[in-house]
Image (tube, helix red, strand yellow):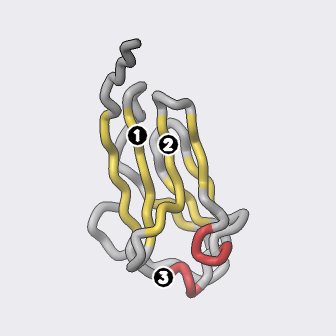
Amino acid sequence: VFGESVSVNEGESVTLVTGLTEIQANDVLEWRFGAGNDRIAIINKPAGVTKTYDEVLGGNFKDRLKLDDKTGSLTIMNVRTTDSGYFEVSTTIAEDIRRHS
């Protein structure tokens, strides 16, 4: 949901969408949360990485994040009151990096 407030009852799941139908081969997508803009998930297609960062924020999201590697949507399971806050998603296109020796 872009720029919208989402209300969820404690214990439910919520899916935050990117608006993308498919992440492209050169895309890097990051989800960030809270005032500290902490990274909680990333999809880096060029590097072949899809990862959630359960350890950030004292492990607040441990075992509760699910990242859709096709669309980049982020599902938060078993929502807690501490999950309230600002979530931001960004997508960039990775540049073709060439090394010369």
Q: Is residue 10 above or below residue 39?
A: below
Residue identifier under label 3: 84
Residue 26, quarter of picture? top left
Q: CA distance from mark 3 to mark 2?
A: 23 Å
Closer to the N terminus: mark 3 or mark 1? 1
* Quadrant for the N terminus in the image: bottom left
Name which residue lies at 70% across and 67% down: 62
Q: Amino acid at mark 1?
A: Val
| Residue 84 shown left or right of residue 57 in the figure | left
Identify the residue position indicated by label 2 in the image: 43
Marks 3 and 1, Cα distance to the nearest angstrom?
Answer: 25 Å
In this orientation, does residue 49 appear?
yes
Task: Name the outermost residue toward the top.
Answer: 101
The secondary structure type at the circle numbered 1 is strand
Left or right: 24 as drawn, with respect to 58: left
Crowding at dot 1, Cα within 10 Å, few <14 / some 14-19 / many 20+, comes out as: many
Residue 3 x, y percent position in the rendering: 27, 67
At 31% from the left edge and 29% from the top edge, which residue is drawn? 95
Q: Quadrant of residue 55?
A: bottom right
**Total tally of numbered discs in the picture:** 3
Residue in view at x 37 percent, y 14 percent: 100
Q: Is residue 6 visible?
A: no
